[in-house]
Amino acid sequence: MAAFIIGALILVILLIIVWYISTMNTFKVMRVKVDEAESGIDVALAKRSDVLTKMLDTCKGYMKHEAEVFADVIKLRKGMTLSEKVKLSEDMDALQKQINITAEAYPDLKSGETFIMLQKSIADVEEHLQAARRAYNGNVSKYNQRLVVFPASIVANACGMTKCEFFEASEKQREDVKIEF
């Protein structure tokens, strides 16, 4: 009888150890997914930079008066913090608005094939960036939920795991867009 109790106790301890390791590994995999999704934002920002830079070269003939605006658009550097990425995103939003304002102010530009391609490219990279942000926030949500749900929260607390930040719109991005004709 004592051997049965000791055997059962060893089995329970082994099950707890296996569960703990499994839970810890799940957290590690989830964290990698969060990091991967954050990298996806970097890729989208780089794509945005490349497209705008290349299209800038093509559109310069049409838009000499706006060359300075485009030239200073992106200074994307590896290792940016999430807040720096939010700031860069705000700057890019301002550029997109500037391009649309330019199109309204200079109707000849709007009808130019190159300028139309630029606008379509901007829409494409913006969509890609939004998808990357959604993927990041989705992975952060799953990770953060797992951190606080019992009994996994025991492992998270024991390993010193902390919540990740969501990619959120800034106050400027939350403002209503004023459209004037």
Image (cartoon, grey):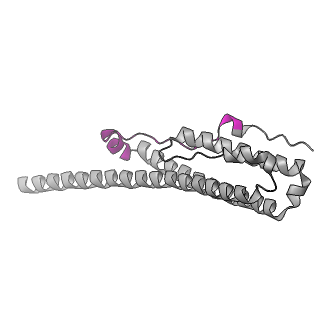
Residue located farthest toward the top when viewing the structure as drawn:
171
* x, y percent for residue 92: 68, 46
Magenta stretch: includes residue 167: yes
Q: Is residue 153 left or right of residue 130?
A: left
Query: Could you tell me which quadrant the N terminus lies in?
Result: bottom left
The picture quadrant where one finds residue 89 is top right
Q: Residue at x 78, y 46 (%)?
A: 66
The picture quadrant where one finds residue 94 is top right
Is residue 135 or residue 101 the one in the foreground? Answer: 101
Query: Could you tell me which quadrant the C terminus lies in?
Result: top right
Residue located farthest toward the right when viewing the structure as drawn:
181
Q: Residue at x 43, y 42 (%)?
A: 148
Is residue 34 or residue 3 the one in the foreground? Answer: 34
* x, y percent for residue 55: 71, 59
Is residue 122 or residue 33 the one in the foreground? Answer: 122
* x, y percent for residue 5: 12, 53
Q: Residue at x 66, y 55 (%)?
A: 53
- Highlighted magenta segment, given as a residue range: 150-172
* x, y percent for residue 72: 66, 43
